[in-house]
């Protein structure tokens, strides 16, 4: 495909772009598996950070050379020290920088001169501390970019790779190796997690503290890890995503191969930006994040606990085929809790097949419950668990398996853990456990951890983790959909927007907005602009009665409130009178308003009132909204969002996921609404936003939807431009 404005790139330039891209990638790789590392600011004082990091690198068993850099020392921790990176005799792929802020820039210049691929800047006092720090950070980035060097941080905790192995961080503990790659925008939270995880035998393949993200972001890491076999799942704690576009591509590609689970803090942030439309007022920034996660297949969780519950399941278990769940338990109460949780999460507890039930009957005491959950009673020993699991596993109707155990008199905790571990060896479905209790189940919990079986202390958490597997598996199975392009009158829109610019309008009234959306194939009522009462009457006769009159003014947002709207006008005389009354009312209430005229519209018959709108998010660009419309939209908030561009599947899904979806599907004798017409409007609005990024907000409210095959019509619309 040839882009309209594709730059003409010479072969030489292209080679150098490729070389730079290759080097940028090598820089990222060098963070985790460098050939050699320098610690700049490795202190003689063993209690200082530089000294601790040097010790961590050496203790982690890093196989390559490690060079302490300190102009005031000849030896640090028994290693020869060098005054500068440029004085090191061999190559230095990675520099860990732990010098005071004002000494960092010359160090980065030295690294650039030495051909260092990446630097981890631990030092704080940059952008997070104010404008002086921000300028200092910018200077670092410029030096690094010019040299093709990557920077992690500043103001970060460092990096751990358990495979290399390398602990280039000031976290005291090197985690156990496992398939989880952990990324954190909060350093302090990172250390807490590493410490907490050690107690739970939770391992990591990588840990990255992102700090200020002057250069390297979570999206860069997703790009890198997309093909990294040591990463089975990425878990991220994020507060903000610096580059929404990069995140969308990176996360989408990553999730096609392995899952990304995110805890995004700050969900409650009020949509503080000034918004003049319903869509803008409704779409707080969390709506954009939620849409970005949804559309990229990223799993969002609300708590740290859920983040690791899911990460643990992903790092050890296969993906399920469907949403089935089979529960084997020695206690009734926890099974009820698990069943409730399953229903809330959309997992189904299918009853076992007839043959399975017969076999269970022959194994279990008569008071046992052989439906699902299968309650094998409080006196179940390890042998009973084994027999039941064997039967359950032989049944193709069995879904993911959750084994619940509470410590009772005859419970054989460790042996039962062994039974589950053995069952897992034979199994292609997920198997998790919930051994509930404290010291009474400890030995079993340890054995499960060693056997790669996630254990959750409460059954609802186990169900939550299994639901995460199922949701992700659903997304992987779902076809990606298609962003359709419609034939539209782009020139017409460009002309209207140009005229708006010329007139200095930042908001387009319903009349001009209708011209824009109609050019993109979105149905609007027949209508035209009248300058006087006679012209209005003439237009109304041509359009056909009844008609609606609406004042057209760039200065009036809420037309009804100033008496600028009259509906249901049945005769030419009604129209003439309404014209004069509207003019008088508006001139009285808003004397300064420029009135272009009064639009005469055909009156659309009643139908289901919906809204389709656009708002501009600072991180992710255009956010498209669909929901139940009309005057109560902001109160009811029955809306759903997608980022632009939306695919045909996204648009279709939007019409099914609002709470009022049953209304559209047709209830109580009402015919189903024309959902195909809604999806077409959604897709066309998406195309409009892609083609004209200058559109800041758009409301089609109401978009009246008629029964199937009878279409939809945008009877009122307003558009705001970015200034
Ligand atoms: N090259 C090499 N070494 C240098 C140097 C340079 N240009 N300039 C100074 N040094 C040496 C110092 O001589 C000192 O070694 P010494 O103790 O043997 O004399 C060592 O580097 C450290 O310098 P010092 O001045 O003692 O700094 P410090 O250790 O007190 O503080 C930081 C340095 C980076 C730890 C501190 O500035 C900082 O940013 N702390 C916050 C870190 C943080 O919390 N990060 C975010 C985590 S989420």
Image (cartoon, rainbow, N blue to C red):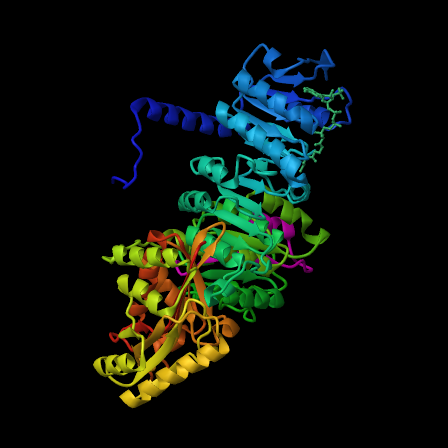
The location of residue 171, given as percent across then percent down, is: 68, 34
Between 510 and 410, the one lying in front of the other is: 510
The answer to whether residue 671 is seen in the rendering is: no
Query: Which contiguous range is marked in magenta?
Result: 396-420
Asked which quadrant contains residue 43, the reply is top right
The location of residue 598, given as percent across then percent down, is: 35, 76
The location of residue 324, given as percent across then percent down, is: 44, 61
Between 280 and 564, the one lying in front of the other is: 564
- Please give the name of the residue rendered at 56% of the width and 23% of the height, measured from the top-left corner: 94
Q: Is residue 120 left or right of residue 613?
A: right
Between 13 and 562, the one lying in front of the other is: 562
The location of residue 226, given as percent across then percent down, is: 43, 38
Q: Is residue 28 above or below residue 497?
A: above
Asked which quadrant contains residue 268, the reply is bottom right
Between 21 and 297, the one lying in front of the other is: 21
The answer to whether residue 493 is seen in the rendering is: yes
């Amino acid at each position: 495909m040839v882009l309209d404005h594709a730059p003409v790139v010479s072969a030489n330039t292209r080679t150098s772009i490729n070389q730079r891209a290759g080097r940028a990638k090598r820089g990222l790789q060098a963070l985790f598996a460098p050939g050699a590392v320098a610690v700049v600011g490795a202190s003689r004082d063993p209690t200082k950070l530089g000294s601790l990091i040097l010790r961590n690198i050496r203790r982690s068993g890093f196989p390559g050379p490690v060079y302490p850099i300190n102009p005031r020392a000849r030896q640090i921790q028994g290693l020869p020290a060098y005054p500068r990176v440029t004085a090191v005799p061999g190559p230095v792929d990675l520099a860990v920088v732990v010098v005071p802020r004002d000494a960092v820039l010359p160090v980065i210049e030295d690294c650039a001169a030495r051909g260092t691929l990446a630097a981890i800047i631990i030092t704080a006092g940059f952008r997070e501390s104010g404008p002086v720090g921000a300028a200092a950070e910018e200077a670092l980035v410029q030096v690094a970019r010019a040299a093709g060097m990557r920077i992690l941080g500043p103001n970060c905790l460092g990096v751990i790779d358990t495979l290399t192995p390398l602990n280039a961080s000031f976290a005291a503990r090197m985690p156990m190796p496992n398939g989880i790659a952990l990324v954190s925008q909060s350093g302090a939270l990172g250390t807490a997690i590493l410490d907490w995880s050690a107690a739970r035998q939770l391992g990591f393949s990588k840990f990255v503290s992102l700090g200020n993200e002057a250069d390297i972001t979570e999206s860069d890491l997703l790009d890198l890890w997309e093909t990294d076999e040591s990463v089975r799942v990425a878990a991220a704690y994020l507060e903000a995503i610096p580059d929404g576009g990069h995140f969308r591509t990176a996360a989408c590609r990553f999730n096609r191969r392995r899952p990304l689970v995110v805890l995004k803090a700050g969900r409650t942030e009020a949509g503080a930006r000034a918004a003049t439309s319903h869509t803008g007022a409704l779409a707080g920034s969390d709506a954009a994040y939620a849409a970005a996660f949804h559309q990229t297949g990223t799993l969002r969780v609300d708590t740290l606990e859920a983040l690791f519950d899911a990460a643990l399941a992903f790092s050890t278990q296969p993906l399920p085929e469907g949403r089935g769940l089979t529960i084997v338990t020695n206690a009734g109460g926890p099974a009820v809790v698990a069943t409730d949780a399953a229903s809330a999460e959309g997992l189904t507890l299918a009853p076992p097949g007839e043959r399975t039930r017969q076999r269970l009957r022959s194994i279990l005491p008569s008071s046992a419950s052989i439906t699902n959950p299968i309650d094998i009673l409080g006196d179940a020993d390890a042998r009973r668990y084994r027999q039941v699991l064997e039967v359950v596993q032989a049944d193709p109707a069995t879904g993911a398996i959750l084994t619940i155990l509470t410590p009772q008199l005859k419970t054989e905790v460790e042996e039962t853990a062994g039974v589950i571990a053995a069952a897992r060896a034979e199994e292609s479905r997920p198997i998790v456990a919930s051994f509930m209790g404290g010291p009474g189940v400890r030995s079993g919990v340890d054995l499960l951890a060693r056997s790669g079986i996630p254990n959750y202390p409460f059954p609802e958490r186990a169900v939550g983790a299994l639901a995460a597997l199922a949701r992700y598996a659903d997304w992987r199975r779902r076809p990606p959909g298609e962003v359709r392009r419609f034939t539209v009158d782009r020139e017409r829109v460009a002309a209207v927007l140009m005229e708006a610019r010329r007139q200095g309008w930042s908001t387009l009234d319903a009349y001009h907005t209708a011209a824009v959306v109609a050019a993109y194939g979105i149905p609007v009522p027949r209508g035209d602009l009248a300058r006087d009462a006679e012209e209005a009457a003439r237009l109304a006769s041509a359009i056909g009665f009844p008609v609606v009159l609406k004042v057209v003014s760039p200065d009036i947002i809420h037309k009804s409130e100033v008496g600028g709207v009259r509906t249901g006008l049945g005769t030419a005389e009604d129209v003439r009178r309404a014209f004069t009354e509207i003019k008088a009312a508006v001139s009285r209430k808003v004397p300064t308003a420029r009135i272009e005229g009064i639009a005469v519209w055909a009156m659309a018959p009643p139908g289901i009132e919906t809204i389709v709108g656009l708002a501009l998010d600072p991180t992710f660009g255009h956010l498209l909204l669909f929901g139940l419309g009309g005057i109560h939209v902001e109160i009811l908030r029955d809306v759903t969002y997608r980022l632009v561009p939306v695919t045909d599947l996204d648009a279709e899904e939007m019409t099914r996921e609002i709470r009022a979806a049953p209304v559209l599907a047709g209830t109580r004798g009402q015919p189903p609404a024309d959902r195909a017409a809604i999806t077409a409007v959604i897709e066309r609005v998406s195309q409009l936003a892609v083609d004209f990024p200058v559109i800041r907000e758009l409301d089609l409210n109401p978009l009246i939807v008629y029964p199937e095959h009878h279409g939809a019509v945008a009877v009122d619309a307003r558009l705001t431009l970015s200034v």
